[in-house]
Each structure stands twice: as structure tokens, then as C-alpha cells.
Image (tube, rainbow, N blue to C red):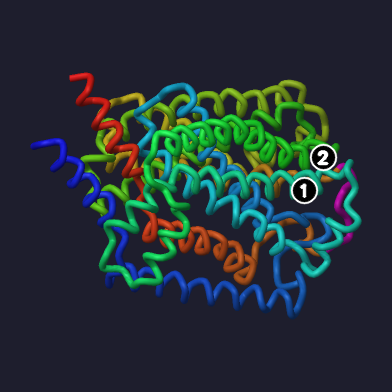
Amino acid sequence: MSDQLKTEKITTDLLRSIRLNKSFLIWMGFLGLAFLICFGAYGLQLKNGMVVTGLGDYVSWGMYISNFVFFVATSLIGMLISAALGLSGQKWAAPLARIAEIIALAFAAVAGLVIVMDMGRPERLLNVIIHGRIQSPIVWDMTVVTVYVLISTLFLYIPLIPDLKICYDRLDKLPPFARNIYKLLSLNWTGSPAQKKLIKQSTRVIAIFIIPVALAIHTVTSWLFANTSRVGWDSTIFGPYFVTGAFVAGSAAVIIAMYFYRKNYGLKDYITDYHFDKMGQLLVLVSLIYLYFTLNEYMVPAYKMKTSEALHLSALFTGIHAGLFWSVQLFGLVLPIILLLFKKMRKPLPMLFIALAVLIGAWFKRYIIVVPTQEHPYLPIQNVPLSFKIYTPTLVETLITIAPFILVLIIITVLSKVIPIISVHETIEQLEENNQKD
């Protein structure tokens, strides 16, 4: 096959997904209906107050804050795949970069809304801006989340500019207004050497800048916990502990997306078994680091077993939270590491199930960090109803917790239908480089 035909095939294959079809409309209809149901539950919370949830005086952070920490964590994958691996010259990650960036942008954008869901008076959010204090971790958290969303948007958009021009040129069956949007966003791209140099330099600058911002977003989130004296949160390693856990959750999310993109969009020639194998190795690496921090987080206080820590750890190891705790550690961390050491398990289908287990375990891991600690304050809980002592989420609270996941899926689905999920111009450039080498 000639280079011209190969280029034509690449362009056709990678633009094939940009179209409206029946399955897309059915999927979006399902997501839209599910989101309306969950939004109705939030309407009940706005009307009646936080009394419709299982939150109370003692456990005031429940599934909502677990959700927030999870969403912030998963959003770090854009930095890991596109920035860290890209700057280190790992070319195998190039076809996965845009997938990671889409996931990062979707989770980061929705993370801020998750915080609003936890507020009984969301209209007072403006007070954080008007009356915020620089020494408040919440102010810093809101700042870094906002900055990270903006940088993630640029990180997705700037390398996308050449592809937007390709979309305008090739997708001639689209309505005129849609093609004009592609033309407008392509910023008069002509593919000149000066423009290519500017795109590469801009992308590299953003890749360098996004690394400290991404590390800051989850480090500051960890400070919201670690700056208190609560047992289970009073830890000096929460910063790196949260960051490594974020890489685990984000890597699992990318693997799941890879499988569905490859299957539904016919991208087996571009998202190959080799990419799954490399992502499996990456997941093992970050999981081993996370396992190390997990051992530090629990074994050090378990060795000392101070009175307050003993109560908290007993609830995790052998008490009311033991089933969830050990399930998360075994099925969400230890077993995936063992399985992924075998090459046969780093194939697409086994990787899908392993990644799903890791991602589900990652969410429940945040739940374990958030909830059990609040059930063991320094002062004993006395003369209160049982519901104050044990946190039990309500149906309304569960539906509201599900809503951000639906919104993330909507964002990812829409972005996947309007832009190529694998860079067309970079794939063509890679083909040309390989031909020159040959």
C-alpha cells in the first residue's frame, strides 16, 4: 500500500466515529433520563435540606466527599499519560494521550460540582471567593481545581487544532454550521512549519506546567484531611499517598476507555494489544507504589496501637468496616497486581475486568478514608440515636452520588463524537517518520 493510501486509510479510520447514529442517540437518551432522575433527587435535597441524606453531626462527610476525592484523583491521568510519559519520550503512549486528556477534563470539570452537592446552602459558595482566607485549604483546593480545569482544556485543545482543520476539510457531509465551528476552532491552520513548531512548543510548555498543577490539586485535597487531628487523617504521607492512588484510578479508567473505543470504533489497528500490555505494566507499577504507601499508612499506627488509633483500626481490620476494607485491598489492589504480572492477563478482555475491579476499589478506598474516621472522634459519642453513630447512605444520597458519574459519561461521549479520539495528524507524522527510517 502506498503512503498516500495509508494516509487516506488513517484519516478515514480515525474520523469514522464523528457521526450521529442510532446507538449514540439511544445511549445519550439513557444517560439523559438517568441524569434527570438523579437531578430530581438533588431537587429534593435542595427543598428539604441535608436531612434527606445519611449525613449528621458526626459523619458530615460521606459519599459526596468520597466522590470528590475520587473525581479529583481520576483527573490526574491526563498529566501522567500526556505530560509525564510524553516528556519522557514514551512514544507508545501517544495514541492514548487524547483519551487520557478527555477523561482528565471530564472528571476535573465535574469535581467542582460534586462539592456543591455536599453543601446544604450552595448559594453561599460565592462567599468562599468573597470572604476566603489564604490560609484556608478549601480556598486553595478551589483555586487549583479551577486552574487544572483550564490547563486541561488547553492541553486537549492546542494539540487538537490540526485535527480540527482535517475535520473541516474531510467531513463534508456535516451541516454547514458544524463545519464552520471546526473551521473557527482550527484558527486558520495551514500546516506550515512555523505553525507546527508553535504547536509543539506550546504543547511542551503546557505539559511541563501541568505536572506541578496536577500534583498540587491532589496534594491540596489531601491537606483537607491531613490538617486535622482526626485519627486516620493525621498523616504526613497523605500527599504522595493520594497522588499515587490517583494514578491507579486514572490508569484503570484509561484502560476501560481503551477497550470500548477499540471495540466500538473499530480501532484495533491503532489501540493494539501492545498498548494494553504497556498500560498493564504501568498499572502494576503505580499499584505497587500505592501498595507501599498503603502499608505505611496502616502498619505504622497498627504497630503503635494508641488507644484512639486502636479503635479506628479495629473497626477496619476486624470490625464493622472489615469486609469492605479487605475487599478493597485484595480485589482492588493486591489481586490485580498479581494477575497483571502474567502477560496473558494483559490482553484487552482480561484487562477490562481487572481495570473495572481497580476502579471500583478505588472509589470504595476513598469511602474508607472518609467515613470510618468520622465514626471515631476523640470524644465518645453518647446519648444520641444509632443513626448518629453509624453512617448509612439514603436512596436520595445514592442517586445524587451517581449523578456526577453520569455527567462524566455524557461529557466523554459527546467529546468522543465531535473530535478524533486518536490524533490524526500525529499518527500520519509517525507514519512518515517510520517511512523515512526505512
Tell which circle, 1 or 2, labels the residue nearer the N-terminal end.
2
Please tell me whether residue 383 belongs to the stretch shown in magenta. yes
Q: Using the image, tell me which numbered label, if any, was put on residue 374.
A: 1
The quarter of the image holding the N terminus is: top left
Instruction: Say which element carries label 1.
Output: helix
Q: Is residue 272 left or right of residue 226?
A: left
Single out the residue that lies furthest toward the left: 1
Q: Is residue 362 left or right of residue 67?
A: left
Q: Residue at x 50, y 24 (%)?
A: 288
What residue is shown with label 2? 230
What is the quadrant of residue 347 in the picture? Answer: top left
Q: Nearer the viewer, residue 112 or 374?
A: 112
The amino acid sitting under disc 1 is Gln
Mark 2 crowdedness (10 Å alpha carbons): few <14, some 14-19, many ≥20? some
Which residues are drawn in magenta?
378-384
Please tell me whether residue 224 belongs to the stretch shown in magenta. no
Q: Main secondary structure of the magenta part?
A: loop
The amino acid sitting under disc 2 is Arg
What is the quadrant of residue 246 in the picture? Answer: top right
